[in-house]
Image: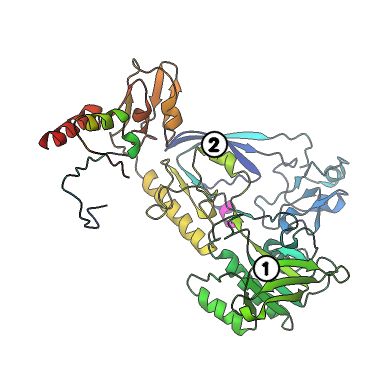
Amino acid sequence: MAGTIRAQYPATIRPIRINCTGRVTPSLMMRAIGKGADGIIVAG
Amino acid sequence: MLEGARTKGLNIYTYSEVEDVEGFVGNFNVKIRKRARYVTSDCNGCGSCMDVCPALGADEFNEGMNSRKAIYVAFAQAVPATAQIDMTKCIKCGLCSNVCELEAVDFDQEDEIVELEIGSIVVATGWDEYVPPKGYLGYNEYPNIITQMKLERMLAPNGPTVGHLVRPSDKETPKRILFIQCVGSRDLTKNTYCSSGVCCMISIKNSKLIKQHYPESEVTVAYMDIRAAGKDYEEYFTSSRKEGIRYIRTNISRIEEDPETHNLQVILQNTLRDSLGLQKMEYDLVVLSCAMVPPTGIGKIQNILKLETSQDGFFKEFHSRLNPVDTKIPGIVLAGSSQGPKSIAESISQGRAAASSLARLMSKDKFKIKLIRAIVDKEKCAECGLCELNCPYNAINLVKGGAEVDDILCRGCGTCLANCPSEAITLRYYREPQYEEQIDAILEET
């Protein structure tokens, strides 16, 4: 969405494509936080 | 319908109900309950039984405005054109079976279950007219307040009054008629949706019809907004205004009845002329233009087909804009008002779209699926059933020995594996370690 409307967003945001927001598991989020991510946006 | 009945290869089961549907696209097993008519298929619809039958019931086809016999043909164009007995009204006198030359009356007939193998399914369950609660706008309290459906039957040449408009209270021709729009729709306390402009167009049509039949009558339409969106609709609306039909933009405050004349006092405020304040107007007949609502029994067929409904209660399509015909289940499509309120033209368009969607599917011998599907490791599966509960496509069945995924119904969303406490489910091509690698790689850079 951000791409199609040519929206500017900080380069520090790194998208990971998933099939469905239902696919996101807590362990994946915990892993990202644990490895130093400042925050996670689950969008769909 | 009659033409359909004559078409070879087209079987129509009327007076029947779908009891159960199993299987998947190309291989549906359908159980249909053919309800007992108590008249065999030998009947040729001659009608001599109806002449002698002494028991009466309300004619459902004419909205209960006239009576029919306990043995009757549902309506003139019914398919098949055979009689049926309403056992709630029948007194089992046997007169009908005495006069029937074809010996078609069978009081001992029972419901019949037909099992069919079906490739694909079109859901075309239609709609019902909204029934206002008793007393709302005087409905069911004052005799001269009727709904649009009753008016339709009254204006029909084959209806209970053979096309004459009469008031229910005294059978006189009404002079002043008021249509009230948006009864039960566009109302936060009832249905929030607009019935797709259908009730607007029906009111315009019927008000024109009344004006043509009775040019001296005064026809008024009380509306919120006239939604005449569609080819030639606006012109139709404009022509009705030129013919002298009056439109008042208002919400009806209340309706009172004159107990002697049964005339109706309608209290309203014209919102385009606020200076006039509350007005009291008298009418002979009030017609409620009621919303289109999901048909009774939609819940049953929803459970059988495992479909979803939208907030308005109609069946939910795959995507409201990009795919309004298909459902989430391959091989099951929606046509007409089963998906939402629709006019005749829109229903035909969707019916054709539904047919072509299935034709594309059924004309091939093979049904291709993507390999992105959930896989269950049965050794890890604790048979808790969380996946079955959370699957939005009803693709998972919990059987003994572990959950089983139906590869045709599964769309590979991965909700099941996110919910699985035993980590027994994986999604092909989208496995956990793949995501973990991605996360690690991204966070390493910083």
Chain containing the residue with disc 1? B
Question: Range of the magenta residues?
Answer: B1-6
Amino acid type at image mark 2: Ile
Which residue sits at x=86%, y=49%? B53
Query: Circle 2 sits on which residue?
Result: B304
- Residue B352, given in percent of the width and then of the height, sits at 45, 56
- Residue B284, given in percent of the width and then of the height, sits at 78, 73
Instruction: Please state if B225 lies on the left or on the right of B85 as rendered.
Output: left
Which residue sits at x=41%, y=41%? B330
Number of disc labels: 2
Against B71, is A40 above or below? above
Is any part of residue B332 visible from this angle? Answer: yes
Give the quadrant of residue B113: top right
Instruction: Please state if B76 lies on the left or on the right of A8 as rendered.
Output: right
**Secondary structure predominantly adopted by residues drawn in magenta:** helix
Magenta run includes residue B5: yes
Q: Nearer the viewer, residue B102 or B281?
A: B281
Q: Point out the tag, 1 or 2, that comes first from the N-terminus.
A: 1
Which residue sits at x=37%, y=34%? B410
Per the image, label 1 sits on a secondary structure element best described as strand
Other residues around mark 2 within 10 Å, as few (<14) / some (14–19) / many (≥20): some
Q: Label 1, label 2: how many angstroms apart (C-alpha)?
A: 41 Å
Against B393, is B47 above or below? below
Per the image, label 2 sits on a secondary structure element best described as helix
Which residue sits at x=25%, y=28%? B432
Query: Circle 1 sits on which residue?
Result: B252
Instruction: Please state if B211 lies on the left or on the right of A38 as rendered.
Output: right
Amino acid type at image mark 1: Ile
- Residue B435, given in percent of the width and then of the height, sits at 22, 32
Please identify the residue farthest to the left as the structure is shown: B445
Name the image colouring.
rainbow
| Labels 1 and 2 positioned on one and the same chain | yes
